[in-house]
Image (tube, rainbow, N blue to C red):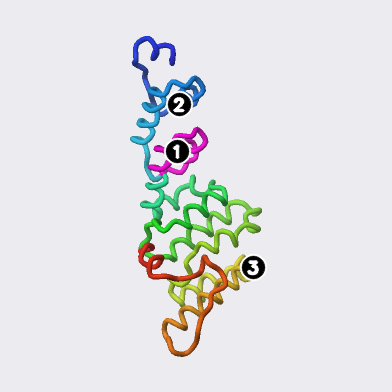
Amino acid sequence: MLVSYVYTSEVYISKANVQALLATANLQDVMAFREACCRFMELQMDEMNCVGIHCFAEAHSCKVLEKRNMDYILEHFSSVSQQEEFLSLCVEKLTEILASDHLNLPKEELVFEAAIPWLNKCLFRKQSFEKVFKHIRLHLISPYYLHDVIESQDVVKENQGCQRLISEAKDYLLLKDHPSSMVLVPTDASSLPSPFISSARC
């Protein structure tokens, strides 16, 4: 098919063949065709496939497609996190998403609600859960949700790091409600609240 493109500058791209064509274009360094495949994949992007397209683009060094898919994931996190592809994310990619100040959320509780199904997908993920949990901005979560939902999870109860982060969040919420009663010195940079961080997650 690439031979046809070289001679005619025309080729049929479909959902069924685009990934194979892009990989071949990369291998043979046919950049114009590679870009055509990237544009096609971008047009097909939706909440169900954006995670897979992002990972594919990253693996094939398609930087523009990779970034646009990440932007889409961040903008539509609430719906993307409910898709099956989201559950296949490795812990490194999931934490990259959750750490972003551009994560678009109506409420921070949705981050925890996305993390639990991801955790339950594979038992071995339990050992990595603290890496995920530290990117949940607990100081933006309702104290009632923090106590009734988050603290009731066994994976949280059994992890000292998670317990420490919850304690810091509670200290911050107490300080916010009673500013003259105490001085808070957070020990973890990821839990440190600031006006910039608070305004970014909304």
Location of mark 1 (residue) = 53
Magenta span: chief secondary structure: helix
Is 68 in the magenta? yes
Q: Where does the image place residue 45, in percent across and percent down from the top left?
A: 37, 39
Is 71 in the magenta? no
Specify few, some or many for label 3: CA neighbours under 10 Å numbering under 14, 14-19, or 20 or more. Answer: some
At label 2, the amino acid type is Leu
Specify start and end residues of the magenta stretch as a single range: 48-69
Question: Which SS class for mark 3?
Answer: loop
Residue 136 placement, left or right of 11: right
Using the rendered view, name the quadrant where residue 179 is placed.
bottom left
Q: Are marks 2 and 3 in contact (CB under 8 Å)?
A: no
Q: Where does the image place residue 50, in percent across and percent down from the top left?
A: 42, 42
Question: Which SS class for mark 1?
Answer: helix
Which tag, 2 or 3, sits closer to the chain's start?
2
Location of mark 3 (residue) = 159
